[in-house]
Every structure is written in structure tokens, then in C-alpha cells.
Image: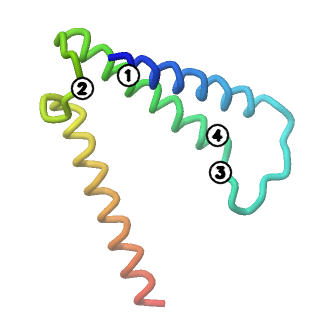
Amino acid sequence: MAQVADKVAEAERRERETRQQLHSPAVDRGPYDVDPADLAEQWVARHAEWRRVAALMDDQDWPAYSPEQDVQGSTWARERDEQREAALARRADWQMEQ
């Protein structure tokens, strides 16, 4: 539970930092830098997910997180894996065509 609380706090801090970067003057980002708006959205999502996990553990009185018991989280993870595999397959197909 303490590790999840640490992750919630970290995500909250990173969300706050990336929001502040969005409102600060633009700096020259290199070609490989992450878009600050995309990064901010990612930290908002991570913060929400860690809060969901913490609430689930608290509601279910789990001493430790168990992915097998987290039906919603497992479903989302499976969907992300399927989307990633499909994207990689599309990319491979595109590269073959080139």
C-alpha cells in the first residue's frame, strides 16, 4: 500500500510539473523531445490510474495489489497490448510496402 501511495504522490507531482511547463515560455525542444502537452496528458492518466488502484486496494482491503483480482485494470492492460500489437503490425506492413 505504501508503494502505491508513493506512486500516487509521484504522479501528482509530475502532473503538476508538466502542467507548469505548459504555461511557461516555450523553449526550443529538440527533434526527439516529447511534446509537453502529450506528456501532461500521460501524467494525468497515470495519476488517475494510481488513484484508482489505491482506492481499489482500500475498498477491497488488499494488503498488496493483485493484477489477477483487478478485473478493470487487467482488461485495460489486455486492450493496450492488443492496440500496441496492431500498431506494430501496421507499421511492419507499411515498411514492407515502402
For image coordinates 21% across by 31% down, the residue present is 72
What whole-number distance in Å separates the C-alpha atoms at marks 1 and 3?
26 Å
Could you tell me if the residues under marks 1 and 3 are in contact, i.e. CB atoms within 8 Å?
A: no
Circle 1 sits in a helix, a strand or a loop, which is it?
A: helix
Residue underneath mark 1? 4
Of the two numbered discs 1 and 3 on the same chain, state the one appearing first in sequence.
1
Mark in front: 3 vs 4:
3
- Circle 4 residues within 10 Å: few <14, some 14–19, many ≥20: few
| Residue type for callout 2 | Tyr
Could you tell me if the residues under marks 4 and 2 are in contact, i.e. CB atoms within 8 Å?
A: no
- Circle 3 residues within 10 Å: few <14, some 14–19, many ≥20: few
Vertical placement of 39 versus 57: above or below? below
Circle 4 sits in a helix, a strand or a loop, which is it?
A: helix
Could you tell me if the residues under marks 3 and 2 are in contact, i.e. CB atoms within 8 Å?
A: no
The one of 56 and 6 positioned closer to us in this rendering: 6
Could you tell me if the residues under marks 1 and 4 are in contact, i.e. CB atoms within 8 Å?
A: no
Numbered label tally: 4
| Residue type for callout 3 | Val
Residue underneath mark 3? 34
Vertical placement of 93 versus 31: above or below? below
Could you tell me if the residues under marks 2 and 1 are in contact, i.e. CB atoms within 8 Å?
A: yes
What whole-number distance in Å separates the C-alpha atoms at marks 1 and 4?
25 Å
What whole-number distance in Å separates the C-alpha atoms at marks 4 and 2?
30 Å
For image coordinates 19% across by 16% down, the residue present is 62
Residue underneath mark 2? 65
What whole-number distance in Å separates the C-alpha atoms at marks 3 and 4?
9 Å
Mark in front: 1 vs 4:
1
